[in-house]
Amino acid sequence: RKGQQNCSWRGSKLAKERKMKPITAALIGLASCHALHFPGRGLRATKPGAAGVAFSAEEVKRIVVVGNGMVGQRFVELCAEQLAEKGAEQQVEIVSFCEERLAAYNRVKLTSWFETRDADDLSLVGPYGDTAGAGEWYASETQPNCKVRVGDTATSIDVDAKTVQCGDEAVPYDAAILATGSYPFVPPIPGKDLPGVFVYRTIDDLEALVAYQKAHGVEAAAVVGGGLLGLEAAKAMHDLGMKTHILEYAPILMCRQIDQGGHDALVGMVEDLGLEVHCDARTKAIEADADGRVARVTFDTEGWADLDVGIVVVSAGIRPRDEVAKGAVDCHERGGVIVDDCLRTSDPSVYAVGEVALHAGTIYGLVAPGYAMADVAAQHVVAELLGEAAPDASFDGADMSTKLKLLGCDVANFGAAAGDEALVWEDKLARVYRKLFFTALPEGGHALAGGILVGDADDYFELLALSKSGAAVEAPAALLTPASLRGAGSGAAVDDADPSKQICSCNAVSRGDLEAFVQKTGESCSYAEIKKCTRAGSGCGGCEPDVKKVLKAELEKMGAVVTNHICAHFPYSRPELVALVKTGNFDTFEEILKEHGDGDGCEVCKPAVASILASLHNERVLGDGRAALQDTNDRSLANMQRGGSYSVVPRVPGGEILPEQLIALGETAKKFGLYSKITGAQRVDLFGAAKADLPKIWADLGAAGMESGHAYGKALRTVKSCVGSSWCRYGVQNSVDFAITVENRYKGLRSPHKMKSAVSGCTRECAEAQCKDFGMIATEHGYDLYVAGNGGMNPRHGALLASGIDEATTLKYIDRFLMYYILTAERLERTAPWFERLAATDDARLAALRAVVIDDSLGICDELDGRMQHCVDTYHDEWADVVAEPDKFAHLFKQFANTEKVQPADEMIEFKEERGQRRPVDWPADGAPQTMWRPPSLDVFGRSETSWIDFGPYDVFPENLGTAVLYGATQLAVFRMKGGGVFATQNMCPHKQAFVLAQGIASDGDAPKIACPLHKKQFDLETGEEINGGDLKIVTFAARVTDAGRLELELPPRDEVDAVLATDKLKVCSEAPVQEPVFSR
């Protein structure tokens, strides 16, 4: 019946649109819903599941595309666009053969499938939904002349009959395009066909691999091949929890892109992640166990031991898929369909694009050249079928420059890998390798010819543009230094605003292209529109930040309002809100919200306002109701770690510590069973503390004269130091003494983001002061003060604010710099990006900053000095406050409000012994067992007999805070909202099965919600549904307050709740437990 209705709808629609007789339209509708075939050039019926509507015309031309990968789909879209622009959609239909079960998806980003395991996130044709794998693009009415045959394989082509063979069906064409791509090459290794051997090419390959690992509990894997895809496959195996080996036949990894120096840097980073690299590997065989599955890999390489692995992934290169073309058009004996500059084959009606096309003796294995081929071929095919003059478009080869992020490491190459001269930068400590090639110019000087960048490729686009320009480089050595370490004014002489600067290399989109599109679209332009219409960002995704920068700049030029509001509750940026708080002298969140905001606040604005109030007034963060504003770490005064436990990092100013304090640290760690580790900032980190134990730990440390530190907060973390002149023979100033002074001055200072500092006793820079938010290097004349540096994901060299200044002047400039930053930075903006917003160049930024904090150009230095001195004078030991006043703060650290019972950490996550210490087992990757938990249904207790259970006085549950309660063996979370509502849910966040929801931030907006403190997943407290696009769910329960002021929850019997939600059933283990049936009657 549904099919008949669909046929009727299509028929009536066609009758109206094309003025057909109803019977003709009905037949066409019927044909489009069933596998009817009408020979000739008239009706063309789709098969069941194929998307698109066939139509009748006197002479409809047909393009048949064999292959629906990234390049094949790009060709279809380009043809469709050109036909639409010419008003010729009715004259040409496009049929694409797709042998996979899903139409085109982004194979470049295949590894990102592991993040969500949702094919829609990779789709190039919109959500697959109920389109039988065709995708929304083909199923929509906007492309009536385009259809895809999902699951159909074209087996041959007959150029005389002009047909493509698919099974028993011969599909006629007027133009055929071969976009069959390539297939993974599997070397003839004995055992290559064993169960457990996989290739890494399609979503189906990945799904099969994950299922195999889960079914057989595989703990180790080998990847044969150390090229681009091999390294991605290795990272995926590692993320699945397997010990991973990379086997490369060549002497180095990525031998087509980098050299020995680049290999050394890359291997260092790969092995830092825990993977093992084996180059010069001569694989002998893949051997099986008694069950016939992969058990080990053996080698012909002398002295190599066998590798015990349960999975082998082969990524040893690709070969063009030219089997459809063989015998029909000219192919090279080593593979590939030979094409000319118009992408035509030896038959003028057959074209080839992408990895199957052999152009001028070259097969291009990157998506960008494939897209360029598709563009040229589409222009010629459309013009030919419409009887137009041949266009001038030709494919003249492609730039093979690439920038990739492999295993978290930048790897790039551009231009020529040879020249008259070569310069090398090799930093083995930082794992950075850069090699630039230069050619001599006839008129003198040198031009940049090409380069290899490993570990730091931030200036890739600038260097690429400079190499293409052929311009003379004044100081070649200046380009060699990584961009993050260059001083102001140095670097590639390329105008960042140059319209010709390439932003998206996958799709050859320049800055000018983006600017023109934004200007044409107007103020409503969005990143999603740019991605859809220009395709910038739709390839590897690496250009997304740059695309967004261009969008923002162009919108601002138009006068469009580009908001940076904190959230929906405050229509202000953070600096604007700081100014309003200062002007109104507000000291509570409620006052600020009433005067300048709306609603109840949320998990974004509450911590942001709490930080602002702390920076301006410096009152106790847990006092007078402020605990409900704090993020989880600030509310607990410690750093939440995996499994919901906490870490304590006692403050050790300047790294100086007494032997008695070291002993106290050890005794405290032993007493509470804490994992101990020396941090990178001269501290001792104690992991695995239960929240209820935190006050007792602080008391023991306090007795030894140590306070806990702000290693968890948006505040000053540490001030690192070397021993300086007190011990070192090279030291010129007492760096330890000054570091202690600096840390004690700024400890507790709340800021928009974390801050770190260091003091080096001489220019040998052992404390690494130049990569800190503010750092001091001693000289014979005093200190050099560097600001706005940072390490981390985007490292930046600090800028030299002042030289040769004494300690008092240094502190004065730091006071002003920090307070100026605190008052004007955006939420979660570190000093480095804040500094970069001050002006266009480092010279201009330094001039602007010096003018404010040294020359007092704005007349605010007195205010900056006063505010900083207030923070220094009002510092208080927050941890000692909790210990001294248990009646006031104890409820914040009690595990369950309704009982003194506790569930220790090892009942919530399994621990394992490692080098004499306990640590939690690794979290499985998202989508693996013990992640993304879902209840049998949201109504899992719908048939249970419930009753109202008392959980104690309502006033025990703080307002706007979550509180955990224990029911049987199940942890529940209760949320008392400011507006009077009360809600109850499971306490386990389903994302990582961690028992932490009660410690998140609850808010009451369009719907009451809770944000998990670990990864900020948000859930509706009424329905249990995940908010903001996710599909996770939590179980909710009814709650009420009795007339006697007691809290009651409506719950099923304990055994039924425990059967679904008991802690021991849901704790994360090294091996996923076998789940028994939930419960039955």
Image: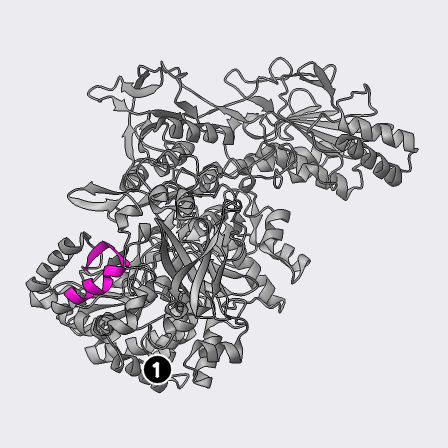
Q: Name the residue at 52% across, 73% down.
A: 572
Whole-percent x, y for residue 763 in the image = 18, 63
> Residue at label 1?
864
Residue 2 located left or right of residue 507: right
| Quarter of the rendering occupied by the N terminus | top right
Q: Secondary structure at mark 1?
A: helix
Closer-to-camera residue (431/14) = 14
Q: Residue furthest right?
A: 21
Closer-to-camera residue (353/3) = 3
664 vs 12: above or below: below
Query: In the rendered structure, which amino acid carries the disc numbered 1?
Result: Leu
Q: What segment is highlighted magenta in the picture?
A: 683-701
Q: Is residue 695 magenta?
A: yes
Whole-percent x, y for residue 448 in the image = 42, 47
- For the question of whether residue 361 can be seen, the reply is no
Whole-percent x, y for residue 954 in the image = 41, 68
